[in-house]
Image (spheres, grey):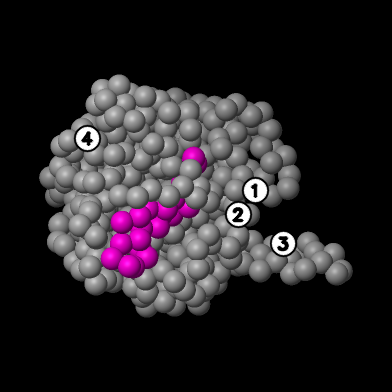
């Protein structure tokens, strides 16, 4: 068996790894690079392999940095099956159709600014490409082994990151590779904890927060309540950039749980996302994957997706109407890194007010507007215009959907005999810190994946 690393190897986004086993070529993820304009421009580059020679694609979960180039792979010749967990399969078209729509809109906007003789901007892929990709999808449940190609078997285990997120076990040539995908923290609301696996010949593990530990989640929730109270007293709005899948649902869960003590009935709450209703429907179809606490909340509290003052806005007109609200609104909108989507319009209307509270609840990649705002930028360039930042900023690290250094070390510690470990999906600072900690504890040399690196298992 052989493993090649082609993405998320020294960075957080663009997950893509190639396994060669039993004479077959299996791709693990096919994600999009996110962050700076330079990073995102790389999405259009040729794949470092021939797409038509890939025999199967296995997807860990339905976040764009893990699925965003799947339609492009099909467009460029991939004709094999695509395997993903059942809930992930329901989320896949929601995410990819939105991605295609954004790509088409960006191309249209760019083409309006072209000068005579300039080449037309072509979107990375279109909705028709998404539909072609979806015809290849085969949904699998957690916990069952399936032979996906002659001599190659896989099983999905719950990764506790978002609904349908999976740890992938892959067997071939008498060897076993375990790919963590993205691992959630133990105790994440709604989701079950990541499953522990005992045996592997090689482990590929994410390392997003490999150099730090999150704040206690309950302390974080208390802080969130204090922010809402301060914002209410100051008469401002609260803006929360959040990913449409995962973080938005967790926030609404906490809103339902703390409905009374946070006095949320006095607020107007907006989940401003054209795909939010579709994502909510997927969650409602898969409550069997919820943890026991979440199932209890669904029974005894207001359903987090049906809070009495919650508006899920789908149309552009409804979204624009939110900007008439000068205070008393909690606005959750994508994208989670503020590098696109409807949150940008709300930032334009609210950043200049010192009564605005801007709350970051997830990872902000290098090169994104979210990262610049977290780092204290006084001006924000949005759609070609500069806006002064007077809003108060809050970084709520304890709500991350990625586990921290302690969690990563604990999950790898579940393997017997300390199998070889390669760190992916992390910036070097985080990976080096995690490699040092695990190496010292377990007496092994941890490898850091690099683009083009090849390992024999």
- Tell me if label 4 and label 3 are in contact, CB under 8 Å: no
- The answer for how far apart the CA atoms under marks 1 and 3 are is 16 Å
Span shown in magenta: 1-26
- Residue at position x 60%, y 40% from top? 367
Residue 233 in picture, x, y percent from top left: 46, 26
Mark in the foreground, 1 or 4: 4
Secondary structure, mark 1, is helix
Mark in the foreground, 4 or 3: 4
- The answer for how far apart the CA atoms under marks 2 and 1 are is 7 Å
Q: Where is mark 2, residue-wise?
A: 42
Mark 1 or mark 3, which has the lower sequence index? 1
Q: Residues within 10 Å of mark 1 (few under 14, many from 20)?
A: few
Place residue 432 in its image quadrant.
top left
Q: Residues within 10 Å of mark 2 (few under 14, many from 20)?
A: some
Q: Where is mark 3, residue-wise?
A: 110
Q: How many marks?
A: 4
364 sits left or right of 223 in the view: right
Q: Where is mark 1, residue-wise?
A: 38
Q: Where is mark 4, residue-wise?
A: 418
- The answer for how far apart the CA atoms under marks 4 and 3 are is 51 Å
- 293 vs 89: above or below: above
Closer to the camera in the image, 136 or 219 = 136
């Amino acid at each position: 068996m052989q493993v090649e690393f082609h993405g998320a190897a020294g960075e957080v986004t663009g997950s893509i790894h190639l396994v060669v086993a039993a004479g077959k070529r299996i791709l693990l993820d096919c994600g999009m690079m996110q962050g700076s304009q330079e990073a995102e421009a790389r999405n259009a580059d040729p794949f470092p392999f021939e797409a038509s020679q890939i025999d199967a694609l296995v997807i860990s979960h339905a976040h764009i940095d893990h699925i965003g180039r799947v339609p492009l792979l099909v467009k460029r010749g991939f004709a094999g099956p695509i395997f993903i967990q059942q809930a992930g399969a329901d989320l896949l078209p929601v995410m990819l159709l939105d991605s295609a729509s954004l790509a088409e809109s960006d191309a249209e906007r760019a083409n309006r600014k072209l000068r005579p003789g300039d080449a037309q901007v072509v979107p990375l892929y279109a909705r028709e490409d998404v539909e072609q990709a979806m015809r290849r999808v085969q949904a699998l449940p957690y916990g069952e082994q399936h032979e996906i190609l002659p001599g190659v078997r896989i099983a999905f285990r719950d990764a506790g990151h978002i609904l349908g997120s999976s740890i992938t076990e892959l067997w071939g040539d008498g060897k076993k590779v375990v790919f963590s995908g993205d691992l959630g923290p133990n105790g994440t609301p709604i989701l079950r904890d990541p499953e522990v696996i005992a045996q592997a010949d090689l482990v590929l593990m994410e390392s997003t927060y490999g150099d730090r530990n999150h704040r206690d989640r309950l302390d974080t929730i208390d802080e969130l309540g204090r922010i809402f109270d301060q914002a209410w007293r100051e008469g401002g709005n609260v803006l929360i950039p959040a990913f449409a899948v995962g973080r938005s649902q967790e926030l609404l869960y906490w809103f339902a749980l703390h409905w009374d003590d946070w006095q949320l009935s006095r607020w107007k709450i907006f989940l401003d996302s054209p795909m939010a209703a579709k994502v909510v429907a997927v969650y409602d179809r898969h409550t069997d994957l919820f943890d026991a606490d979440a199932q209890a909340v669904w029974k005894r509290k207001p359903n987090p997706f049906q809070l009495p003052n919650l508006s899920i806005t789908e149309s552009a007109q409804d979204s624009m109407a939110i900007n008439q609200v000068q205070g008393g609104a909690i606005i959750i909108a994508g994208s989670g890194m503020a590098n696109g989507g409807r949150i940008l319009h709300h930032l334009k209307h609210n950043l200049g007010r010192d009564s605005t509270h801007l709350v970051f609840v997830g990872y902000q990649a290098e090169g994104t507007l979210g990262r610049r705002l977290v780092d204290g930028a006084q001006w924000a360039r949005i759609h070609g215009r500069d806006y002064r930042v007077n809003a108060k900023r809050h970084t709520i690290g304890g709500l991350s959907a990625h586990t921290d250094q302690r969690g990563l070390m604990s999950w790898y510690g579940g393997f017997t005999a300390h199998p070889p470990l390669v760190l992916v999906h992390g910036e070097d600072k985080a990976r080096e810190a995690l490699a040092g900690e695990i190496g010292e504890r377990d007496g092994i040399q941890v490898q850091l994946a690099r683009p083009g690196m090849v390992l024999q298992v």
